[in-house]
Amino acid sequence: MTQKIQDSTVPTETNSETRLSAAALSEHVTQLFSQRMPFNQLLGLEINQLSHDKVEIRLPWHNKLMGNPIHKILHGGVTAAILDTVGGLMAILYAIKDYESISIAEFQKALPNVGTIDMRVDYLRPGKGTEFIATAEVIRKGKKVAVCRMELHNEKGVHIAFGTATYMIG
Amino acid sequence: MTQKIQDSTVPTETNSETRLSAAALSEHVTQLFSQRMPFNQLLGLEINQLSHDKVEIRLPWHNKLMGNPIHKILHGGVTAAILDTVGGLMAILYAIKDYESISIAEFQKALPNVGTIDMRVDYLRPGKGTEFIATAEVIRKGKKVAVCRMELHNEKGVHIAFGTATYMIG
Amino acid sequence: MTQKIQDSTVPTETNSETRLSAAALSEHVTQLFSQRMPFNQLLGLEINQLSHDKVEIRLPWHNKLMGNPIHKILHGGVTAAILDTVGGLMAILYAIKDYESISIAEFQKALPNVGTIDMRVDYLRPGKGTEFIATAEVIRKGKKVAVCRMELHNEKGVHIAFGTATYMIG
Amino acid sequence: MTQKIQDSTVPTETNSETRLSAAALSEHVTQLFSQRMPFNQLLGLEINQLSHDKVEIRLPWHNKLMGNPIHKILHGGVTAAILDTVGGLMAILYAIKDYESISIAEFQKALPNVGTIDMRVDYLRPGKGTEFIATAEVIRKGKKVAVCRMELHNEKGVHIAFGTATYMIG
């Protein structure tokens, strides 16, 4: 079942010395992506943690996301942005899943080493719909680098785009 | 010299039957990208036609474009969006450069066949700066498909990202 | 069931004016890939048509395919070559599947327009094994361009690499 | 000037405990690529170290490299293989350039961590020519990961393909 990260039991004002389990840290990270990344909020991304190792990002259509106003389709840059975001979140959740106990301060020190190295997007069909759903899975699992494949569908299950991205995670 | 497309001599309300030269059509297209694509406006893209076959897109930093608020860097999705946009515009300008005379109505009929097929983005350095400048060149020139390479620099000339994208153009 | 293309009922010396059905043409193309492309033979590719719209390519290990002799793993270039080949064959089979009747001469005229535009390879695990199996599916279906995803596994089902490639088909 | 690696002053039978400078190690690595990787020899790659941080790979045309025998052009897999090889060699040379002193035994321990993570190839023009020349440069320089851009030209300077690849180097 979908657990909205807004319902998270990790308080936003977590003391940075508090030690978190992997599960609590993954909720903290999902919150970061949802509430502290301004561009994700500008797009209107709704980030849901489905389980400790599964996330989805939903994006309700609004007119400002349009590329081509004649055909009312999603701008290719929006597709790329949501795919990069869901892949990056998945890569971090993968990287932290075996942490026994870490403080937020320690985690924040590691964060600058996290980032997208490269990404490919394959645009399969025009981005038409009332809502878009992005999912990701880790296909290469390493200590320093993870590779994810991402998919974007609309609310009817129409497959709009694939993504493949390589992330630095350590 | 940079000619802001806002200064364009093609009236916005061009009659759709008016026949345009390649030069006039390229101005018309640059205007479309600048003024009629809502997501480009949401980002704040400033699209400048430098000559009949050269464009650049400038993006002044603003806080809503942030991915990581701790390090104040551009969201990777913004980088992908601006690269896709400058490459796509370049691909269309390439496609229309040999048109002798075309009406806007004819051109609009061709537009649905135009779009990104795939794109790779290489993130080289953190997206820090007060302004970002995207440029593009066509590296594979075909009748149906064009491939572009794109670059993103900041205002100091620091190279932030490369892009490579394949566009359907006919 | 696997039908070895060597068993094909289309004679190698088909008269170029003979009109072929889509099924016969797809066998002809599979034969071309298997018997008339010298580099495929140098690698030792065994191309099997599994059904009218499904192929696999098998590659038995031999020492000349090694990149790293210390670890006895497949050269990354071999992985790229077999993925490009299976994707390209799949793209052509997709392109011709609706042909009602075509002569080989007509088909050969169309061939120069067929080719790889771009390809991404993701190397997931070291290429170890006694045999490698490549498969492909078409993920974007157009008249002029098709996009395929390819996979490479070894004889134990270990997933070694993913590929994604864009092909000109018309 | 081109210094053929065959002329190298590093004896092939270097004692694995001998400590090498960065310059001597780079010659050793270039030799490895040239003489100990069977697939590079099957292709006929001629690997030349142009300076301590610059390499080129030359490939004389021979019929076994053909993909399409009707048009006598290079198989796309050969293009991918030579680009992956020149990029990988460049990435390793970049990784070792600051080594003050290392033994071959130490270097060989590090080697399993070296490999291609992903690669994109853009096929620009048919691979026609009597000789092909591949070059590479490092565009993202990190401790664990390097990204290279590669180019393939023929003997007349015709640009045949671009490559972009991400390598694990540490």
Image (cartoon, coloured by chain):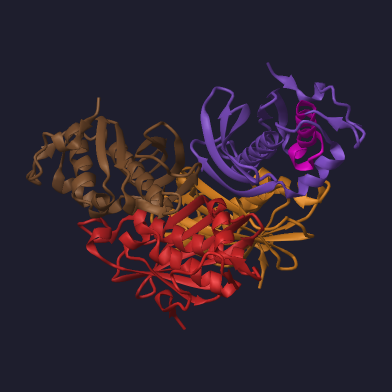
Chain colours: A orange, B purple, C red, D brown
Nearer to me, B90 or A48: B90
Extreme-top residue of the structure: B1
Residue B87 appears in which quarter of the rendering? Answer: top right
Residue A90 appears in which quarter of the rendering? Answer: bottom right
A163 to the left or right of C32: right
The structure residue drawn at horizontal position 44% and vertical position 63%, both measured from the top left corner, is C33
Q: Is residue C56 above or below residue C75?
A: below
**Residue C123 on image: x %, y %:** 40, 57
**Residue A19 on image: x %, y %:** 48, 57
Q: Is residue B85 above or below residue D52?
A: below
Q: Is residue B38 magenta?
A: yes
A78 to the left or right of B120: right
Numbered range of the magenta stretch: B22-42
Quarter of the figure that contains the C terminus of chain C: bottom right
Residue A20 shows in the view: no
**Residue C128 on image: x %, y %:** 30, 65
Q: Is residue B37 above or below residue C37?
A: above
Q: How many marks?
A: 0
Residue C78 appears in which quarter of the rendering? Answer: bottom left
Extreme-bottom residue of the structure: C1
The structure residue drawn at horizontal position 79% and vertical position 31%, both measured from the top left corner, is B31
Q: Main secondary structure of the magenta part?
A: helix
**Residue A92 on image: x %, y %:** 50, 55
Q: Is residue A115 above or below residue B4?
A: below
A94 to the left or right of D133: right
Q: Is residue C96 magenta?
A: no
Nearer to me, D163 or B143: B143
A145 to the left or right of A92: left
The structure residue drawn at horizontal position 51% and vertical position 27%, both measured from the top left corner, is B158
Residue D78 shows in the view: yes
